[in-house]
Amino acid sequence: MRPAENQGEAVNTQNTEHRAQSTDNAGSALIITLLIVTILVALVVEFAYEVYIDTTSLSNWENAQKASLIAKSGQALSARYLAELKDRKYTDIGEFTMPVEKDLGPNTQLILRLEDENAKFNINSIIYAENGKTNDKALLSLQRLLEYLEMDTKLALSIADWIDPDSEPRLPDSEDNAKNSHLWNIEELRTVPGIEKSIFDKISPFITVFGDNLININTARLPVIMSLSGDITETLAEQIIAYRESSPFENRTYVQRVSGMESIGITINDRITEKSSSFRITSRATVNEITRIVESVTDTSNKIYFWREG
């Protein structure tokens, strides 16, 4: 082969190698570029997501703060209403729920619920606060309430042991880890042996730990009325409720006017009242689907016994 031909082939080989090298470099550059773009896109998406989360969190926080303030305002509004009840001769409204119609802003709602604590049986009353002794009348009432609700009446003894200050068990192991003091709220019943959630849920609408231990005969529900005396049958309790619907008891002694209650009314006179002093207020405020609830127990003099926010 001649020298010129050899030189031409060498040049062609070099050009081919150069083009291949250029193609490889271009491919590598493209891959690197794609990787950089991918990373940048991921960073932008992550940044945008964090901004969205931060913005949403800030918005939720602002809504929660506004809802909390509105719920507290609802408590103040309810307290003023209760102050007006103080001047009435009797209380005949056991519970009611009302939405506040005042314009509170867009997507904002306030609902108030008031419950008469004197319409319920005070489980703390089974043990005298003064000396720690058993209040036999109240203990029997609790047993009757449990019986009507188809629960084991021995639970009343477990509750009594949980509250009383001594260490003498009425039932085996009922004094183990007992509080030996009055309950601060009804949720504490869940810590009493034998009080399961299903039992608590069933009895909780009829019990309280607040108030003066007197049951408002105008507002008490049927199971609570029946708990006052073993002589009050379901039929008799229904007659009391029917009587007060048309003619509320302006005086506790007026319960004796109900047919069949002439004598029984005298025996329960020291345990009932016609006027309530303690109420549970639940104020529920919602702002843009964020809800805050403020719950309290107060009396008609605006003395607060219990306060919870959530």
Image: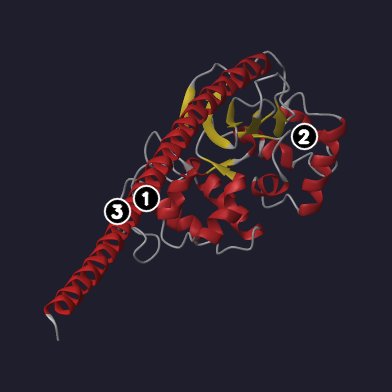
Percent position (x, y) of residue 177?
Answer: 30, 55
Mark 1 secondary-structure assignment: helix
Q: Dot 2 surroundings within 10 Å: few (below 14), some, or many (20 or more)?
A: many
Q: Residue furthest right?
A: 246
Identify residue type, mark 2. Val
Closer to the camera: disc 1 or disc 3? 1
| Image height of 181 relative to 297, above or below | below
State how far apart marks 2 and 1 are (Cα): 77 Å
Q: Is residue 250 shown left or right of residue 298?
A: right
Give residue 41's position: percent from left, percent from top: 39, 48
- Between 180 and 170, the residue placed more toward the observer is 180
Residue holding disc 1: 42
Helix, strand or loop for disc 2: helix
Residue nearest the observer in this picture, 294 or 44: 44
Badge 1 or badge 3: first in the primary sequence: 1
Residue named by callout 3: 167
Question: For the residues marked 2 and 3, what is the alpha-carbon distance in whole angstroms?
Answer: 40 Å
- The residue under the point 64% across, 58% down is 149
Q: Earlier in the sequence, mark 2 or mark 3?
A: 3
Relative to residue 175, is residue 45 drawn left or right? right
Asked which quadrant contains residue 73, the reply is: top right
